[in-house]
Image: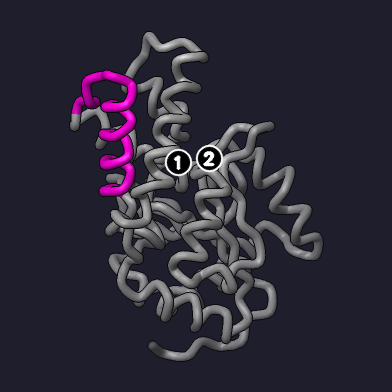
Amino acid sequence: MTALFPATSTIVLFDFDGTLVDSTPAVKASLQLACESMGAAPPDPVALDAAIAQGVLMGDLFRLIHPRADSAEIARWLEAYREAYRRIGLDHSRLFPGAVELLQTLRQAGYRLTIVSNKSEPSIHVALQHFGLAGYFEHVWGEQADMPGKPQPDLFVRKILPAFPQASRSNFLMIGDTVADRDFAAASGVHFCLVAYGYGEVSLNGRKDCFKIHALNELPHHLQAARSFA
């Protein structure tokens, strides 16, 4: 991979599932186990794929699959799913090709790396340790109990910006694979890179501060353009 120029202020916000890690098989296998433990029929595959592609929070995913479920039932589903995911999730997950090499290159070039995901924070930390990626990230932000997830910009305004007090919004680049990631970047006023190999069918809507890659090893070629947006 071509070495990058030094970068002292660019902050890269990585989505996790569908961007760095292919975890769709893990989600589906864990949902299957959760359904079995709850004595329920598995979700419709088309509805499940559509929900995953939207990048929604897991609680909202269950509401899409079971629209009549009340809060107590959703909580039971979440616990059953998370217990299953803790047992088998990592066995059904893999890094996308080039992930480690890209993170090494970016860190060596001076980029500041973070995770911004709708996945539960403890699950992200466990996965980062499992894949040997924990040391690359300055911050890890997952699902927040006190605010909505992506695409709402609350997390960016209330936690991400304060964590980088010297940065302006033009210093941030969001990298993700779903409409939620794209719209989070737009709502937060930051640049966006779509990874086309991920879970969603996403249009960039002609935005000039966005670009698309088809593999992680394409990203360095675009980073000069990303910096020139400012």
Q: Quadrant of the C terminus?
A: bottom right
Q: How far apart are marks 2 and 1 (CA)?
A: 6 Å
**Residue 140 image point, x, y percent:** 61, 56
Q: What residue is shown with label 2?
A: 150
**Residue 211 image point, x, y percent:** 40, 62
| Residue at position x 50%, y 63% in the image | 128
Query: Which three-letter amino acid code belongs to the residue tagged 2?
Result: Lys
Q: Nearer the viewer, residue 230 or 46?
A: 46
**Residue 72 image point, x, y percent:** 51, 14
In the rendered image, the residue lying farthest to the bottom is: 3
Quarter of the image where one finds residue 113? bottom right
Q: What residue is shown with label 1?
A: 180
In the rendered image, the residue lying farthest to the right is: 165
Q: Which of 149 and 76 is in front in this view?
A: 76
Q: Is residue 46 left or right of residue 20?
A: left
| Residue at position x 60%, y 76% in the image | 111
**Residue 136 image point, x, y percent:** 57, 73
- Magenta span includes 174: no
Q: Which of 9 and 15 is in front in this view?
A: 15
Q: In this view, does 125 lie above or below 86?
A: below
The stretch in magenta equals 24-44
Q: In this view, does 57 lie above or below 111?
A: above
Tell me whether the residue at label 2 lies in contact with that at label 1, contact meaning CB atoms closer than 8 angstroms.
yes
